[in-house]
Amino acid sequence: MKKARLIVPAFNEEENVDLFYDEAIKYLNYDDIEFDILFINDGSKDNTLAEIIKLSKKDKSVKYISLSRNFGKEAAMHAGLESSKDKDFIIIIDCDLQQPPELITQMIEYYREGYKIVYTKSKSRKGEPKLRTFFANLFYKIYNAYTERPLANGAKDYQLMDKIVVDAFLKIKDNHRFIKGIFSWVGYPRKCIEYDFIPRKHGKSSWSFRSLVKYAFNGMNQFSTILLVLPVLFFFLGIGLLALDLVLYFTNIIDLTSLVLGLHMTLIVLVMSIFAYVVIYLLYSNRKQVMNRPVYLVEETSEDIQID
C-alpha cells in the first residue's frame, strides 16, 4: 500500500475549504494508495483555520499545519514537503479550485508509468488580466534566455512529485524558495498536463503586482544569470550616454546642448538607479541567505503531524 498526500496551501480561503475538500476526495479513492490531505494555513486573517479544524474532526485523513504568520506560498509548500518525508509521493494543489482536482487521476496514471514529476500548465492565458499576462510572458522569455533549465510558460505549482524528488528538493538550503525553478533544476523524468484557465469561485488572489515582481526577481536571482548581466549593460549604457553628453558639450552645439544634455542626464540617472537597485537587491538577497533564518515558523499542527 503506497502512502500519498495532498498538500494544500491556504491563505484567507474560508469560503473555499469545504468546496475544495468535497471536490478533491472524489479523486482520492484507490485500493493500493492511502491518501491524506494536509492543509497549510499560511497566516490567514479569516476563519480558514477554523474551517480546516472542523474538517479534521469529521475526517481523520485531514491534517493541518498553521504557520505563525503569512510567510508566503513558497514557504507554505516547503512546510508541507518537510512534513511529508514518509510519503511515497505528494501532490501540491491550491485551495481555490482554480487547479482542477480531477487531474489527479491522470497524474497518478503517469506516475504509475514511471514519471517522477507530473506538472501542470495553462493551455493559454485566456481569462487572465492582460497586464499580468504581458508581464508573465515577458518573465518567461527573459528567464529562459538566461538559464540552463528553462521553465514552461504557464507552468503551475500544481504537480505530483515522487519521494525521490521531494528528498532532492529538501537537500537544497536556499533561503529564497523558487519552487518551479528548484523542481526544474533537480531533473528526473517528468510529464506535463495542460488545462484551461479556471476563475476563482470565492475570494480574491493574494498575489499583488508587487508580490509577483518580487517572486520573479527571486526566481531570476536563483536560477538565471540575467541579474548579473543587467548591471554590466546598464553601466556601459550610462558611460556611453555620459560620453555623448561630453561630446555635445565640447563641440559647442549650443542650440541642442541644453535639451539633449537634459534628456541624457535623465537617462543616466534612470539607468544608474536601476543599476543600483539590482545591486542592492542582490546584496539584500545574499544577506538573507547568510542570516539563515527559518523559512517558516509553525504555530499549531494536527497531533499526528511532525516537522523536523
Image: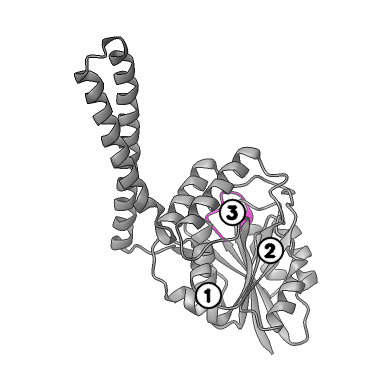
Foreground pick, 75 / 165: 165
Asked if one can make out residue 3 in the rendered structure from this viewpoint, the answer is yes
| Stretch in magenta | 41-49
Is disc 2 surrounded by few (<14), some (14 to 19) or many (20+) residues within 10 Å?
few
Q: Amino acid at mark 3?
A: Phe
Identify the secondary structure beneath mark 3: loop
Q: Residue furthest top?
A: 255
Give the number of the mark in front: 2 or 1.
1
First in residue order: circle 1 vs circle 3: 3
As measured in the structure, the alpha-carbon distance from the residue carrying label 2 to the one carrying label 3 is 17 Å
Residue wearing tag 2: 54
Identify the secondary structure beneath mark 2: helix
Residue at 75%, 49% (x, y): give it: 201
Q: Amino acid at mark 2?
A: Lys
Foreground pick, 271 / 18: 271
As measured in the structure, the alpha-carbon distance from the residue carrying label 1 to the one carrying label 3 is 30 Å
Is disc 3 surrounded by few (<14), some (14 to 19) or many (20+) residues within 10 Å?
many
First in residue order: circle 2 vs circle 1: 2
Q: Is residue 278 magenta?
A: no
Quarter location, residue 239: top left
x%, y% of residue 200? 72, 49
The N terminus appears in which quarter of the rendering? bottom right
Give the number of the mark in front: 1 or 3.
1
Residue wearing tag 1: 187
Q: Is residue 44 magenta?
A: yes
x%, y% of residue 228? 34, 53
User: Residue 11's mark?
Assistant: 3
Left or right placement of residue 232 versus residue 302 in this view: left
Please say if the residues under marks 2 and 3 sit with CB atoms less than 8 Å apart. Answer: no
